[in-house]
Image (cartoon, rainbow, N blue to C red):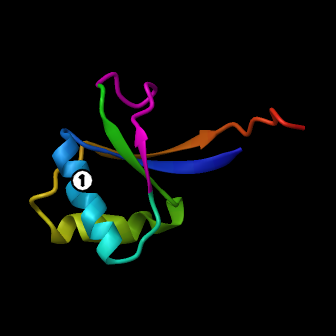
Amino acid sequence: MRKQTYILFPSHSDGLALEKKLKEKSIKYIISPTPRSLSKCCGISIIIDPELRHLIEEIIEENKDIEVSGIHTIEKKSRNWFK
């Protein structure tokens, strides 16, 4: 199993604002639907490398106008569909 860290937002605009900051700093990320196991709300989340969590938290702290609903690291099962 591999770990993925999801950043959840109260609105799409907050997610897009963080995306802009990550692009400026050349930090790799993936925009993804929010997993239902983390939130029942429809919305986007950003997936980052778990090792970058502290760096991302610093960026969020520096940019008080970006609201985050939570940062969660979960284990994802590897699926070997194409063995």
Disc 1 marks which amino acid? Leu
Residue 35 located within the stretch drawn in magenta: yes
Pick whichever, 41 or 32, lies toward us: 32
Direction front: furthest residue? 82
Residue at figure coordinates x 30%, y 33% from the top left = 43
61 sits to left or right of 81: left
10 sits to left or right of 81: left
Direction left: furthest residue? 65
Q: Percent from the top left, x then y, of residue 37? A: 46, 26
Q: Which residue is mark 1?
A: 16
Q: Percent from the top left, x then y, of residue 71? A: 36, 48
- The image shows residue 56, relative to residue 69, as above or below, that is below
Residue at figure coordinates x 73%, y 40% from the top left = 78
- The image shows residue 28, relative to residue 73, as above or below, that is below
Residue at figure coordinates x 63%, y 39% from the top left = 76
Magenta segment main secondary structure: loop
Quadrant housing the C terminus = top right
18 sits to left or right of 65: right
Asked which secondary structure carries label 1, the reply is: helix
Direction top: furthest residue? 40
What span is colored magenta in the figure? 30-41
Quarter occupied by residue 27: bottom left
